[in-house]
Image: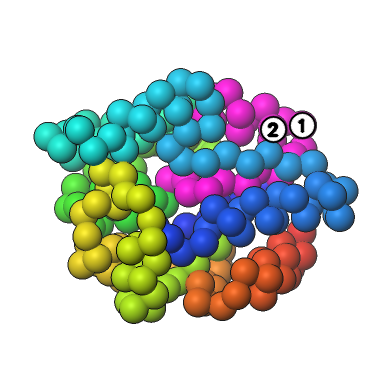
Amino acid sequence: MIISFEGVDGCGKTTQAILLCEYLESVANVPCVLVREPGGTKISEDIRSVLLSKENTNMSLLTETYLFAASRAQVVHEVIRPALAENKVVICDRFYDSSAIYQGRVNGLGEETVWKIHREAVREVLPNVVIFLSMPEDLIESRLKLKSKDRIESKGIDYQIRVEKAYQERAKAYPLFWYTLDASKDRDSLAEEVRKIYYSIV
């Protein structure tokens, strides 16, 4: 199974992805693999550095989308497919839905175009479950102020609020496998809710 964590920057998805993987391996005795997006392999991490560099301010939306697809294709080929073949749980700190939201909805390329670009990259490898950590606007602002910002995070609070709203819309469109959690809760409470979601689907 593939479980992906989604949400705006600073929502805590990375922390919750790590905590779930640690719990599965150390407590539940379930083998799992954790990957981050973009990244997860040497090639994908190299692509990540290009995507997130503040120096690349002139990057076109199509270039950005193809680079995300290339990074994703490599991590699917090198990590995710082999892990699934070994019956491991794959936990993704972002996956395809991030591109559907950021490049497709918020940046305006369109979800259909984004899917056409990514279809060959991921094929049938898509999350079985998406855990969306939703944040109120005031929390988005306060958390982003504490982060050192990459190229995408530097687009500002208004941009992140648009991303949050787009995530909320997508979550409503796919209620059967999207789970929305309140990211303003403390870390341990969220981790417990994530574990409950896991046990409800296995």
CA neighbours of label 2 inside 10 A, class few (<14), some (14 to 19), many (20+): some
**Which amino acid, mark 1?**
Glu
Query: In the drawing, what numbered circle is on residue 200?
Result: none
Give the residue drawn at x 62%, y 69%: 187
Say if 49 sits above or below 5 in the image.
Answer: above
- Magenta segment boundaries in residue numbering: 75-96
Left or right: where does residue 98 sit relative to residue 31? left
Residue positioned 45% across, 27% down in the render: 44
Residue underneath mark 2? 83
Residue 186 x/y as whole percent: 60, 75
How much space separates mark 2 and mark 1, taking CA atoms? 5 Å
* Helix, strand or loop status at disc 2: helix
What residue do we see at 22% from left, 60% from top? Answer: 156
Count of marks, rendered view: 2
Q: What amino acid does circle 2 point to?
A: Ala
The location of residue 98, given as percent across then percent down, is 39, 51
Expressed as whole percent of the image width and height from the top left, the position of residue 1 reads 67, 47
User: Mark 1 packing: few (<14 Cα in 10 Å), some, or many (20+)?
Assistant: few
Can you identify the residue that label 1 sits on?
86
Q: Is residue 16 visible?
A: yes
Magenta highlight on residue 79? yes
Instruction: Choose top left, top right, bottom left or bottom right for residue 59.
Output: top left
Q: Most extreme residue toward the top, as rendered?
A: 43
